[in-house]
Image (spheres, rainbow, N blue to C red):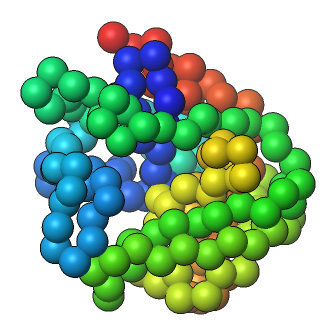
Amino acid sequence: MHSPQGDLILTAAHCVSDSDNDLVFVPGYRDGKAPYGVWKLGHSYLPDGWSKDQDEDSDLAFATVDDVDDRPIEDVVGANQFTVGTATGATAVTVIGYPDSREAPIRCTNKPTVHSSTQQRIDCPAFTTGTSGSPWINGDGQVVGVLGGHDEGGSTDDVSYSVTLGSQAAELYKDAISDP
């Protein structure tokens, strides 16, 4: 996720909120290989609605990624723009995820639809356990959703959800980039 410090990722809140373990980010992981290295996560930023009540409409989080060899993650792998207020279904999005059952990512491109005033959904086959936190990226390289939300991303392998990125998401991003 693009940020002034070049050190931010976006994920689902349920992916980072209950973790007692040291979490890592492994961009480009495939078949046991980490071509860009293993990056330790630093601080996580979760909305109050998730921290207090695990409200599915607040199932998104940002996390800082610690530098490796004095290089921020964005300098190594690039970053997408975080975008709020995009109308659900305005364009197709590509969802890229890492199911627990595979050693390689899967992807799906489709148009999301409205699930509710605060949630969007997308029909994508085989997005099983492990794909939560996957970005929804439009054709302009903007992240307009993150797999999570309703039923922590979905109760079937073929329909996934995201919170609608609005003012709450914008405020959380602002908090994450303004914290030194």
Question: Residue 78 placed where, x, y %?
Answer: 42, 37
Left or right: residue 111 versus residue 36 is right
Q: Which residue is nearer to you in this view: 37 or 154?
A: 37
Residue 154 visible: yes
Left or right: residue 60 versus residue 36 is right
Question: Residue 25 placed where, x, y %?
Answer: 27, 51
Q: Which residue is nearer to you in this view: 87 or 72?
A: 72
Q: Is residue 175 above or below residue 95?
A: above
Could you say which quadrant of the image residue 122 lies in? bottom right
- Report the residue at 75% width, 72% height from top: 110
Residue 100 visible: no
Question: Residue 142 placed where, x, y %?
Answer: 66, 43
User: Which quadrant: the C terminus?
Assistant: top left
Question: Residue 89 placed where, x, y %?
Answer: 86, 60
Q: Is residue 47 above or below residue 148?
A: above
- Report the residue at 62% width, 75% height from top: 108
Left or right: residue 145 versus residue 97 is right
Could you say which quadrant of the image residue 31 lies in? bottom left
